[in-house]
């Protein structure tokens, strides 16, 4: 796994560039604003590792003591982060600095593009893909001598109120893109873990809204529920007690819940004009409703008349 070192510029007694109006300086902005966001995304890396140089120290001062850039372990890259400063409050843009002994690599160019997106490019690097080659920076020369891949970032001007405020506002995505450009690893693009299968919510059987006993009885009498076994099935399926409904129907039509009359007896009643069976469709409906087959009964009636 490739390891990358990030060095936050300045530190210890050196605040670096200062924006008096906003009460900001490079040392503290790097450590208090940028660092937490960088750490957040560094922790999400899977195929590479980012470590941070001791933030209580200023690498420049340490290097002058023969430590700092001289003694960091060999890593895939070192990225030292700064903001620019100018007495001209409108100076704007950032850039990537590398040793003039090398050409920018793909990570340098990716970092320059991140800077371009957040602060734009500083005027002098606009036709150099955002990269400035130098031979007069202390840590840069030490690392070039060591053959250690190193670059220094100027993210933008801390002295430009609008610029540093914008970098602060967008620090989360800025940090994410810096980590990605440094490592070449895309964060958060993993295929989603298979989710736990969703348990179907237990289906509560919906209680059908039932008609009152009287209303369903009258519907049956009116012939809305068909006849015979089909009617029994439909009533039961709809949530009624078919037997109970039939009893109610019989009670209403026959004055008893339990028809004991045979087809023959009913036919006789009809033929003699008893039982209130009526005629025509009314009779058919009543016969059906009370569980008789109107055709059968009618055939018997016809024989009797
Ligand atoms: Zn600086």
Image (tube, rainbow, N blue to C red):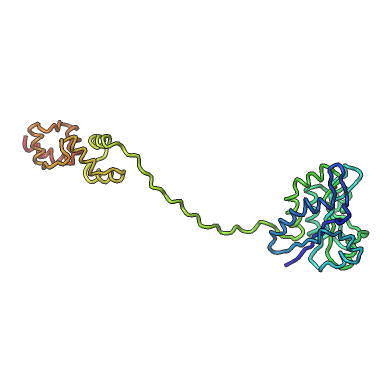
Residue 190 drawn at (x, y percent): 64, 59
Q: Position of residue 111 (x, y in %)?
A: 79, 55
Q: Residue at x 90, y 66 (%)?
A: 66
| 25 w.r.t. 255: above or below | below
Which quadrant of the figure has residue 183?
Answer: bottom right
Residue 210 image position (x, y, % from top left) = 32, 39
Reply above or below: 144 against 89.
below
Q: Residue sitting at 87 percent across and 63 percent down?
A: 102
Percent from the top left, x then y, of residue 14? 89, 54
Q: Is residue 243 above or below residue 106?
A: above
Q: Quadrant of the N terminus?
A: bottom right
Question: Does 169 sit left or right of 276 as displayed?
Answer: right
Instruction: Report which quarter residue 4 is drawn in.
Output: bottom right
244 or 121: nearer the eye?
244
Residue 12 location, quadrant? bottom right
Q: 274 or 55, which lies in front?
A: 55
Counting every numbered tag in the picture gives 0
Residue at the farthest right position: 136
């Amino acid at each position: 796994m490739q390891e990358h070192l990030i060095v936050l510029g300045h530190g210890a007694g050196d605040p670096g560039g200062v924006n008096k109006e906003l009460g900001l300086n490079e040392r503290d902005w790097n450590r208090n604003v940028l660092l937490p966001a960088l750490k957040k995304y560094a922790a999400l890396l899977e195929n590479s590792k980012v470590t941070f140089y001791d933030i209580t120290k200023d690498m420049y001062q340490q290097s002058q003591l023969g430590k700092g850039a001289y003694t960091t372990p060999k890593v895939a890259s070192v990225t030292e982060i700064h903001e620019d400063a100018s007495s001209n409050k409108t100076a704007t843009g950032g850039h990537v600095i590398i040793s003039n002994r090398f050409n920018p690599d793909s990570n340098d160019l990716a970092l320059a593009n991140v800077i371009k997106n957040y602060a734009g490019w500083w005027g002098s690097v606009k036709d150099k893909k955002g990269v400035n080659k130098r031979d007069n920076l202390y840590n840069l020369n030490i690392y070039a001598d060591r053959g250690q891949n190193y670059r220094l970032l100027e993210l933008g001007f801390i002295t430009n109120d609008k610029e540093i405020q914008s970098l602060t506002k967008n620090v989360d995505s800025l940090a994410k893109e810096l980590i990605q450009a440094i490592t070449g690893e895309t964060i958060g693009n993993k295929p989603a873990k298979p989710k736990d299968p969703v348990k179907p919510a237990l289906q509560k059987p919906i209680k059908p809204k039932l008609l009152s006993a009287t209303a369903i009885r009258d519907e049956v009498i009116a012939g809305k529920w068909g006849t015979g076994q089909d009617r029994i099935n439909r009533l039961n399926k709809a949530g009624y007690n078919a037997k109970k409904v039939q009893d109610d129907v019989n009670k209403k039509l026959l004055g008893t819940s339990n028809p004991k009359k045979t087809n023959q007896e009913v036919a006789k009643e009809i033929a003699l004009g008893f039982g209130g069976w009526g005629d025509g469709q009314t009779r058919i409906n009543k016969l059906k409703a009370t569980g008789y087959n109107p055709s059968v009964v009618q055939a018997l009636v016809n024989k009797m008349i």
